[in-house]
Image (cartoon, rainbow, N blue to C red):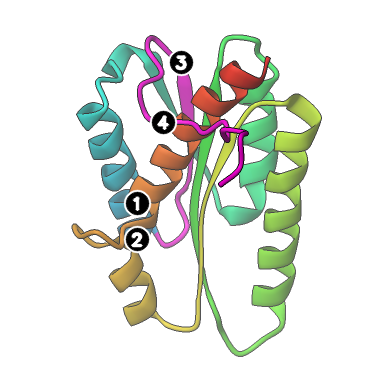
Amino acid sequence: MSKFRPIEGNYQVGDVRLAIVVARWNNDITDSLLAGALAALERQGIADDNIQVLRVPGAFELPLAAQKAANTGRIDGVIALGCVIRGDTPHFDYVCSECTRGIGDVGLRTGIPIGFGLLTCDDLPQAQARSGDNRENKGEEAALTVLEMISLLKQVR
């Protein structure tokens, strides 16, 4: 056993301010992701007044809105939620790739934790399974990830 203890985050982050950026495209799915994220934040005691929800047209727009929110200086974490479902053209690949890269870049550039809640699914049933009112809701996972990263980064400073 190592004599070193790892630094780990938790969900008890106190009075934090969060932005949730949600794509309107595939809104039945993204609304469910948003509901999962909000439920998770409520369970952890995050006040509604400390959460700002930003709606964007689609997944491709998530990184820009996340960056804008992160750069305000008033946000401790951003949760990005969207859904891209594979179609018959390569459009899926381009959108998924650029959105993923963009969201990752925002976190690295700003130093603000970004929760990655972008579903990239082959079909609608896959998206429904990952956004339902269940333990698989990726909106909930993205919200909890942001809280854990906020806690971890506070300890590292």
4 or 2: tag closer to the N-terminus: 4
Precedes in sequence: disc 1 or disc 4:
4
Asked if residue 125 is positioned above or below residue 32 in the image, the reply reads below
Q: Residues within 10 Å of mark 3 (few under 14, many from 20)?
A: some
Circles 3 and 1 in contact, beta carbons < 8 Å = no
Percent coordinates x, y for residue 87 in the rendering: 56, 84
Q: Identify the element where label 1 is drawn.
A: helix
Label 3 or label 4, whichever comes before in sequence order? 4
The kind of residue on which mark 1 rests is Leu
Label 2 element class: helix
Q: Which residue appears at 41% of the width and 39% of the height?
A: 143
Circles 3, 4 touching at the beta carbon (< 8 Å):
no
- Locate residue 48, reporting x and y percent: 28, 18
User: Mark 3 sits on what residue?
Assistant: 17
Q: Which residue is mark 2?
A: 29
Question: Label 4 sits on what residue type?
Answer: Asn
Residue 48 part of the magenta segment: no
- The answer for how far apart the CA atoms under marks 3 and 4 are is 16 Å
Percent coordinates x, y for residue 57 in the rendering: 54, 48
How far across and down, in percent of the image, does residue 72 sit? 65, 13
The answer to which of 70 and 64 lies nearer the viewer is 70
Lateral position of residue 93 relative to residue 140, left or right: right
Does 102 sit left or right of 148 as displayed? right
Q: Amino acid at mark 3?
A: Arg
Q: Nearer the viewer, residue 52 or 109?
A: 109
Give, as a single range, the part of the protein colored magenta: 1-26
Determine which of the numbered discs, if any, sits on residue 88 in the image: none
On the image, numbered disc 1 is attached to which residue? 33
In this rendering, does residue 131 appear at all? yes
Give the label, 1 or 4, closer to the camera: 4
Mark 4 — residue? 10
For numbered disc 3, what is the local secondary structure?
Answer: loop
